[in-house]
Image (spheres, rainbow, N blue to C red):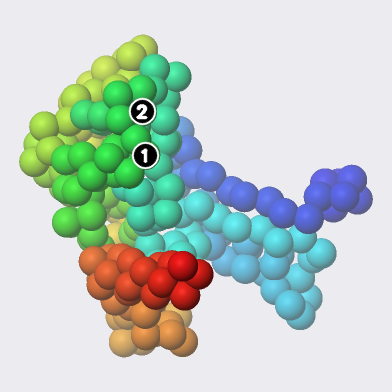
Amino acid sequence: MIIEKGCRYAWYFHYMPVGDGGSADLMPTIEQREYMYHRIREVRAVEGGKPIFAMDFQNDGEYVGGCIAGGRAYCHINARGDVEPCVFIHYSNVNIRDMSWLDCLHQPIFQAYRSHYPWNDNMLQPCPMLENPYILPQIVKESGAKSSDYSAPETADELCERTAPYAKEWAPKAKELWLDEHPTGKKIYDDQMTCEKIELKAQRIAKEDAENEAVHV
């Protein structure tokens, strides 16, 4: 029906047990997530697929190099102006009303996020809260960030206690699916830069920007 209505893109988001009333019981089961992994690839297949490009926020991590949050490719600002690593991760120690975008991204919560990334080589386990629940509490503790969920504040430890059982249950299936697609255990990209660390990418971008600026002066 949505294709007939002219829809050409679809983006699947998995339920995250955060916020007021967050419940791990509402998360997709392992069997449901595996089904989505295969089905979404069938839908967007060049041969035999449908005329719509479907994406999966959790299961398509390999196409964007894993987690894109923490300022790596995006972050989130809540209604009060708190700048958070992710729309699902409500911890912050910086407000957009107090400083520039660049200064916000230099604050401890984002520095800690980047220092821990990547969490692992399996991009079917892309989230520091959902599939790697031991990571987020470390980031929050190191950065001194506070809960920015003003309706149902909770510590990162409390949040990740809810996701830990799911992470443990999903891990063997994630490994099976990942190794079936990537026998070496690592995603091999066509370009070398994609595999480099964030610091090196930033240096390369800064160098190219400086060179371009010098040309136009």
Q: Residue at x 21, y 39 (%)?
A: 107
Density class for disc 2 (Cα within 10 Å; few <14, some 14-19, many ≥20) is some
Q: Residue at x 8, y 41 (%)?
A: 142
Q: Is residue 36 left or right of residue 177?
A: right
Q: Amino acid at mark 1?
A: Trp
Q: Amino acid at mark 2?
A: Ile
Q: Is residue 145 left or right of residue 165?
A: left
Label located before the other in sequence (1 or 2): 2
Q: Residue 93 shows which numbered tag? A: none
The answer to which quarter of the image holds residue 62 is bottom left
Residue in front for this viewpoint, 131 or 52: 52
The residue to which callout 2 is attached is 96
The residue to which callout 1 is attached is 101
Is 55 rendered above or below residue 186?
Answer: above
The answer to which quarter of the image holds residue 40 is bottom right
In this orientation, does residue 30 appear? no
- Secondary structure of the residue carrying numbered label 1: helix
Density class for disc 1 (Cα within 10 Å; few <14, some 14-19, many ≥20) is few
Q: CA distance from mark 1 to mark 2?
A: 7 Å
Where is residue 143 drawn, in percent x and y?
13, 38
Where is residue 78 drawn, in percent x and y?
42, 25
Q: Are marks 1 and 2 in contact (CB under 8 Å)?
A: yes
The answer to which quarter of the image holds residue 9 is bottom right
Residue in front for this viewpoint, 121 or 147: 147
